[in-house]
Amino acid sequence: MSELDELLLEVSRLSDVAPSTPSELVAHLARLKKVAARWADLLLSVAEVSSSLGEARTAAAVEIAFQRAEQSFVELEIAHSTYQSRRSR
């Protein structure tokens, strides 16, 4: 199974059950963070390849997708750490 297939499987598992308790939300956000990080890593590797194999537009588009994925990871990290720290007070 490819890394992308594994990532898609993880995303489908995440969408199966919505969190219903604060503890489940913390765990869900942590899993989302991991998925976002893996997605960004995959896009980065494609961006590196497309800069040498693809056209300039293709490379630019994949680079933008990578940046957005990385930004999603950062936002999920903020959401997770903020919620987790508020719960521990």
Image: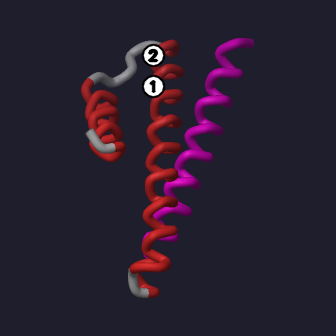
Residue 59 position (above or below residue 76): below
Query: Is there any visible trace of residue 60 in the rendered image?
Result: no
Query: Is there any visible trace of residue 25 in the rendered image?
Result: yes
What whole-number distance in Å separates the C-alpha atoms at marks 2 and 1? Answer: 6 Å
The kind of residue on which mark 2 rests is: Glu
**CB of mark 2 within 8 Å of CB of mark 1?**
yes
Residue 67 location in percent, x, y? 55, 63
Q: Quadrant of the N terminus?
A: top left
Q: Which residues are magenta?
A: 61-89
Pointer 1 local density, CA inside 10 Å: few below 14, some 14–19, many at least 20: some
Viewed as shown, does residue 54 lie left or right of 72? left
Tally of marks: 2
Residue holding disc 1: 28
Pointer 2 local density, CA inside 10 Å: few below 14, some 14–19, many at least 20: few
Residue 19 location in percent, x, y? 39, 20
Q: Residue furthest right?
A: 89
Out of 25 and 8, give the one closest to the viewer. 8
The kind of residue on which mark 1 rests is: His
User: Secondary structure beneath disc 2?
Assistant: helix
Residue holding disc 2: 24
* Residue at position x 45%, y 59% in the image: 43
Q: Quadrant of the C terminus?
A: top right
Q: Which mark is residue 63?
A: none
Residue 22 location in percent, x, y? 51, 15
* Residue at position x 46%, y 78% in the image: 59
Residue 34 on the magenta span: no
Name the image quarter holding residue 79: top right
